Structure formats: structure tokens, C-alpha cells
Amino acid sequence: MKLLPKLLASAALAMGLALPAVAQDPFKVGFIYVGTPGDYGWTYEHDQARLAVEAHYGDAVETVYLESVPEGADAERSITQMILGGADMVFTTSFGYGEATNAVAAKFPDVYFEHATGYMREHSNVSTYNARFYEGRAVLGHIAGQMTESNIIGYIGSYPIPEVIQGINSAFLHARAVNPDVEFRVVWAYTWFDPAIEADAAQALIDAGADVIMQHTDSTAPQTVAQEAGIISFGQASDMIQFAPRPRVASIIDNWTPYYIRRVGEAMDGTWTQSDIWEGMPEGMVVIGELTEAIPAEVRASAQVMIDALKAGTYHPFTGPINKQDGSAWLAAGEVADDGTLLGMNFYVEGITGEIPN
């Protein structure tokens, strides 16, 4: 349909006729959300990036979104519906949308697809993008290890997938580095966004003695529970600054805006190519939010040193010596983990108790 104005103009020129200018339809970009923009976490940040795309391109772009789309067959139907509604490009913003994204991409080869945190690129019109969240977890672990008084840190995991396991290991290594008595207790929520389940998980960890709560889930429910219990927590995916200065003493922020603006621009000007990117703090895709004054000054200072090193690319959170949970050697002194191992990470590091569910 968008070729029609060009075809009419070409025909008019061939006949020596003049036609009034025909306005081009805006480039339509769709977003599939697993939660709601009001979660003030994962989906909120994707939606902020969507709004930034609108602001950047103005009338040249139209954006649409569907929220609370379950992973699985419902996702395939929702993506298809969005394309039949005119979407030229679709961002599917949760790991579990991988199969649905590729299934729909096969049917619509002229549509651009971008899948967040995934790895499946079965068709040339599908790209994947991810953030090195484990870099931010290192900073939060460094702070948590020095602020806990019970030496028990609670961690709410969503699903036992490599992205989440990376974060648990990174946070633990850096907490244990500053406090050898630290223990991690992990509770699996088996959801990305469910405030009730997340609240129950936080309370269970507090009941088990945790005085610091970390999370890899999307809602602010753990913040509320931590606030009521008088313990500390960290913002997840977005700043969650409304809970500062306590319980939220720092945060890990997912900044998708530069990537979304860049990729939409490439799709519009014809330079988009399939890619698989994994960016972190050096590129600004992972950002650490304000370190509040609830953190002791010396801890804030040492955390800032780590932040600066991560942003400069001079420090890698998985630098040996590191052993696996069973005591076997993983990384020798000074050795850095390769991306392939991290992307497939299915083991805990030494010192973490408990098993990763199958």
C-alpha cells in the first residue's frame, strides 16, 4: 500500500501530468509487552523507549503496543494482529516470545522483527538484542554485601534461564568478595510480573532472615514488602526512585532508548540488517541509578569505582579465579568468562547453596 503514492507519481510523470503531493503514511512500529507500562519496571522502561522513538521521529513514525501478552501461542496471535493492523516493524520484549516471533516472521518477510533477550534468528528479518544485566548486578552485590547485617541476602528469580543465573552468580561473587560470611537464598517466582507472587517471595525471604532483597522480576511489590519490613532493596529494570532513599538504595536501569531509536531509523532508511547485540554499561544500555545517602559514604565511593571501571570496560564481573558450585575450576586467575559460556550459563558458582531447577 505504501508504494501507491510513488506509483501514481511515476504514472503522472509519464503522462506529463501534475499531481498534488501525496503524504506518506508514517512508519508504524509495534511493541509486544509481557507486562504493563504501569509496572514501573521492565515494561515501563520499554515503553519509555517507545515514547522516545515517537519524540525523536515525530510524525514520521506511529507506534502501537499490546500489553500483558502471555508468552506462547497468545503471543503469535498478538504479533500477527499487530502486523495485520499495519505494523512495519515489531519489537517483542520478552525472552519467551522467541518462537512466536520467528513463526510470524516467516509469514511476513517484509516486516522487521526485534526480539529482546532472545537468541533465535531463524529468518533474515529477525534480530535479537540483549543487555549485560550481570554488570549491574555486580555493583548491587558489592553494595548488598556491605550493608547486610544478618549476612543473608534474598534473591527473587523469575525463571532459571541463563540471563537470571548470570545475575545471581554476579551479585553473589561481588557480595562475597566484600563479606565472606554472606549467604544467598534464592526463591523462584516462575513469572516475570505478578505482584502478589513477588510479594509472597519477598516475605518468604525476609522470614528466612534476609535483610536485603534483590529481584529479577518486574513489579515494585518486593519494594513495598521491603519498606514495610524496614530492610533494603534495589530498583529492578527501572529506577523505582519512588522507594528511595530506603528501601531502594540503588537500582539497575535498562536503557533501551538509544537502541530503539537507532534500529527504527535503520529500518526507515533501508540500512537495517540482521544483528545480535549484547550491550552493557560501556554502551549505556545498563545504567546504575542514584546511590542514595542510605548507603554509607565509603560503600558509595567503592561502588562508584566499580561503576567507573565497568563503564570504561576495564573490569569484567566474571574474572577468575572462580570455581563452579561443585568446587571444580571454571576460570583461572585473571581469566575472563567468554560470552558463549555466559549465554548458556546453567550452573551456580562456588558458595551458593541450593540447586537450579530443571
Image: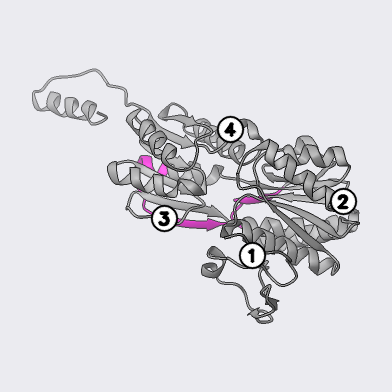
One can see residue 320 in this view: no
What distance separates the C-alpha of mark 4 from that of mark 3? 24 Å
Q: Residue furthest left?
A: 15
Residue on which the image places disc 4: 36
In this view, the mark in front (1 or 2): 2
Percent across and percent down for residue 341 are 55, 70
SS of the residue under disc 3:
loop
- Crowding near the residue tagged with mark 3, few <14, some 14–19, many ≥20 C-alpha atoms within 10 Å: some
Amino acid tagged 3: Met
Q: Indicate whether 168 appears above or below 31.
A: below
Number of numbered labels in the structure image: 4
Specify whether 37 is left or right of 262: right
Residue on which the image places disc 1: 313
In this view, the mark in front (1 or 3): 3
Q: Nearer the viewer, residue 269 or 139?
A: 139
Residue on which the image places disc 2: 295
SS of the residue under disc 2:
loop
